[in-house]
Structures are given as structure tokens and as C-alpha cells.
Image (cartoon, grey):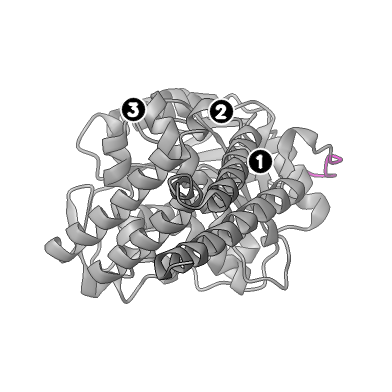
């Protein structure tokens, strides 16, 4: 075999191991993370008060319908802290209108952002200050709830003595090609953070979900609080880390039959939305690292499909075909578990190319701008570097 042949063999072997680990992790994930609809916990003697804390910045298109769905919950003891975070659209008027129509809603208007804070983290901090619940449910402005979601989750958390429950929503389709990219992203996210180990107190694995982060107030008060997260762009995941490292008991559930959200409206929106995490968490503020991470990701993801082009080595082609089948089966298996569409998951190579491009793009823009541009504000690299808490990989 030629030198090129040996290099190709080594490459395919590494790619094969990568996809075997993907498949193994997918099975562990789906076997350990419970579905909310399968939980049947007994009702607690007294239902603890729950405060829903909902930050909204220019969310006029989605805020009212999503908030009304949460007000339709059958939980017996809850309040909603609805936060207008420096919005320039009609979000503030919607907040006041909803509050005027339901006494369970506390409106909060934020007009200024103090130096050294990201907007959403600051809004969560201010909302927590006026909330009165024993449990705090941090949830994004565009999430729709099915009645019974809070009741079942709180009862389960109380039964198991948990301090933090993150719940995965169903992501509404906004187009076929966006579904292709989302299928690839969610697979990498679930597996990269070791979701199956979140509930293990001896593991450092942690998670948070912006759609649904339920936190026991007493557990949050034992941490350094939101001040520790004030410059973290991945605030939802970092909240899970903050709690886990303080000794809180965390868990992850699949609530795709109870929660739904339209995450992005287009691939362009996803590219812009991914800039924060790709530049800070993946690239660690380095364009060179962005190139390295993106190239490595693309190489591993594409390895079995590139093996199909090894016409001079039929055995390698056969191995590539087998590994390609394993990769596609893993992708479909996970997307079915998450209640997503199956067909987009089969275009895994397309998703891999686009996701690698997102990483390259975020690294370049972060380097050129000297930071990240988020909701019209430029956050400088030197400032963000001091407050980034999440690291991956």
C-alpha cells in the first residue's frame, strides 16, 4: 500500500472510531434521559410556589402568544415575572397589556444595562430579585407550554430531591434546509456535553436549556449567583454549571411533547445566532482555533462519506459504506427521539459542511470586530474573556 493509502486508512480508522463513539453516546443519551410524559410522580403535600422569569428583548412577534400559553398552565401556585429588556419595538406595551389582564403577572421594564453585564443575564438577575417563588423557572420569551408541564416537572423534582431540571423542547420547523442544519447541531450538542451524565453527581457534566431551566431558589442562593455569569453568552448551559459545581442535583428531561419553540427562522438567522457560542466557547476567541475546530469537525463528520470515493481500495469503500450507514442511523435515531423530521437528518454531510462554515465565519467575524455583536451591542473580546464559563470541547 502506498503512503497515501496508509494515510487514508488511518484517517478512516479515526473517523470510524468517532462514529462508533457517536452511536454509543446516542444510545446512552436516549436510555438515560426520561420523557416527561412517562413520569408519574405523586403530588406533593403542598405545591411550592413557582416563579416563571421571562426576559424579552424585541420579542413583539412571539411574546404574547407564548406567554398566554404559560398562563394557561394548571399549576395551582405560580406567578410570571415578565421582563421588557430595553426593547425598541412593542414588547413593552405587550408586557403591560398582559400584566393588566392577569394579576399573576409582574411586569418589569429595564431601560439601562450596567457595564460588565450581558443583557439577558442582567434581566434574569433583576427578575430573580422580585420573584417570590420557591422554584424559579427561567424560560425564553418564545416558548409555548402544554398545560401540565410545570405541575408534572415540579412534582418529579420534589419526589427525587432535585435542585435543577432542564427540559428539551420540540423545535418547530421553519424550512427543510434549516431542519437539516438543526439536526446536525442538536446531535453534536447532546453528545458533546455528555447529556447522559448530567444526573450523576460524581460527573462534571452539566446542561441548561433556555426554553426551560427550573431551579430551586435555595440551591441558587448557595451559588455565586448571576454575577458569576454576567459575561457568559451561553447563560443557560452556564447556569447548569454554576449549580452543578455548587453541589446541586441536576437532571435533564425530554419534554418535546410539552414544550415547543421556533428557534430560528432561517439558516442566515442561525448563522448570526451561532456567532456568540462559536467564537467564545468553541474558538475561545481565536480565529486560528476556529479554523482548527471547524476543520477537525468537518474531517471527522465527513470521513465515512469521503471513503466512498476511494475507488482504488474497495475494502476501504466497503468500510466507508458501513460507517456511513452507522452515521446516518445515529442521526435518524436521535432526531426521532427529539421528535424532529427524519428526512433532513439523512443529509448529514450537508449539515456538517454548513456547521463548519458557521465556526469559520464566527471566528473570522470575532477577530475582525474584536468581539461579538449581539442585539446591536459590541462586546469586546478582552471583556468577554474574563467572564466566559463554558468550555467546549
User: Percent from the top left, x then y, of residue 70?
Assistant: 55, 30
Whether the residues at callouts 1 and 3 have beta carbons within 8 Å, the answer is no
Q: Is residue 208 left or right of residue 370?
A: right
Taking the spot 35% from the left edge, 59% from the top edge, the residue there is 294
Task: Indicate the position of residue 199 as horizontal and vertical percent values.
Answer: 71, 60
Question: Is label 1 or label 3 in front?
Answer: 1
For disc 2, the marked residue is 342
Q: Secondary structure at mark 1?
A: strand
Judging depth in this view, the residue of 93 and 324 nearest the camera is 324
Question: Of the residues under marks 3 and 2, which one precedes in the sequence?
Answer: 3
**Residue 254, which numbered label?**
1
Residue plotted at (51% across, 38% down): 80
Which label belongs to residue 73? none
Task: Give the mark toward the camera: 3 or 2.
Answer: 2
Q: CA distance from mark 1 to mark 2?
A: 18 Å
Answer with mark 1 or mark 2, whichever residue precedes in sequence.
1
Disc 3: which residue: 94
Amino acid at each position: 500500500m502506498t503512503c497515501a493509502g496508509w494515510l487514508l486508512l488511518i484517517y478512516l480508522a479515526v473517523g470510524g472510531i468517532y462514529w462508533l463513539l457517536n452511536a454509543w453516546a446516542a444510545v446512552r443519551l436516549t436510555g438515560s434521559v426520561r420523557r416527561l410524559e412517562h413520569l408519574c410522580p405523586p403530588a406533593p403535600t403542598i405545591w411550592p410556589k413557582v416563579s416563571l422569569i421571562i426576559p424579552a428583548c424585541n420579542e413583539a412577534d412571539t411574546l404574547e402568544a407564548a406567554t398566554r400559553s404559560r398562563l394557561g398552565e394548571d399549576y395551582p401556585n405560580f406567578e410570571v415575572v415578565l421582563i421588557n429588556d430595553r426593547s425598541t419595538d412593542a414588547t413593552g406595551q405587550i408586557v403591560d397589556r398582559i400584566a393588566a389582564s392577569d394579576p399573576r403577572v409582574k411586569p418589569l421594564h429595564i431601560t439601562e444595562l450596567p457595564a460588565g453585564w450581558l443583557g439577558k443575564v442582567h434581566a434574569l438577575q433583576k427578575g430573580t430579585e422580585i420573584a417570590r417563588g420557591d422554584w424559579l423557572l427561567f424560560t425564553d420569551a418564545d416558548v409555548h407550554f402544554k398545560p401540565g408541564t410545570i405541575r408534572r416537572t415540579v412534582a418529579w423534582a420534589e419526589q427525587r430531591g432535585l435542585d435543577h431540571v432542564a427540559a428539551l423542547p420540540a423545535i418547530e420547523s421553519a424550512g427543510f434546509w434549516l431542519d437539516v442544519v438543526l439536526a446536525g447541531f442538536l446531535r453534536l450538542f447532546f453528545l458533546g456535553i455528555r447529556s447522559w451524565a448530567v444526573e450523576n453527581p460524581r460527573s462534571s457534566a452539566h446542561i441548561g436549556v433556555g426554553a426551560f431551566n427550573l431551579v430551586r431558589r435555595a440551591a441558587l442562593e448557595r451559588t455565586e449567583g448571576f454575577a458569576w455569569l454576567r459575561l457568559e453568552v451561553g447563560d443557560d448551559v452556564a447556569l447548569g454549571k454554576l449549580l452543578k459545581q455548587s453541589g446541586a442535583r441536576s437532571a435533564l428531561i425530554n419534554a418535546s411533547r410539552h414544550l415547543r419553540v421556533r428557534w430560528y427562522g432561517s439558516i442566515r438567522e442561525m448563522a448570526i445566532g451561532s456567532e456568540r457560542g462559536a467564537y467564545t466557547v468553541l474558538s475561545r476567541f481565536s480565529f486560528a482555533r476556529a479554523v482548527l475546530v471547524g476543520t477537525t469537525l468537518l474531517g471527522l463528520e465527513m470521513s465515512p462519506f469521503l471513503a466512498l470515493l476511494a475507488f482504488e481500495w474497495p475494502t476501504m469503500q466497503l468500510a466507508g459504506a458501513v460507517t456511513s450507514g452507522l452515521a446516518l442511523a445515529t442521526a435518524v435515531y436521535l432526531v426521532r427521539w427529539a421528535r424532529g423530521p427524519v428526512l433532513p437528518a439523512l443529509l448529514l454531510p450537508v449539515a456538517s459542511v454548513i456547521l463548519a462554515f458557521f465556526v469559520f465565519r464566527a471566528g473570522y467575524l470575532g477577530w475582525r470586530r474584536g468581539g461579538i455583536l449581539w442585539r446591536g451591542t459590541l462586546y469586546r473580546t478582552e471583556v468577554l474573556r474574563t467572564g466566559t464559563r463554558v468550555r467546549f470541547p
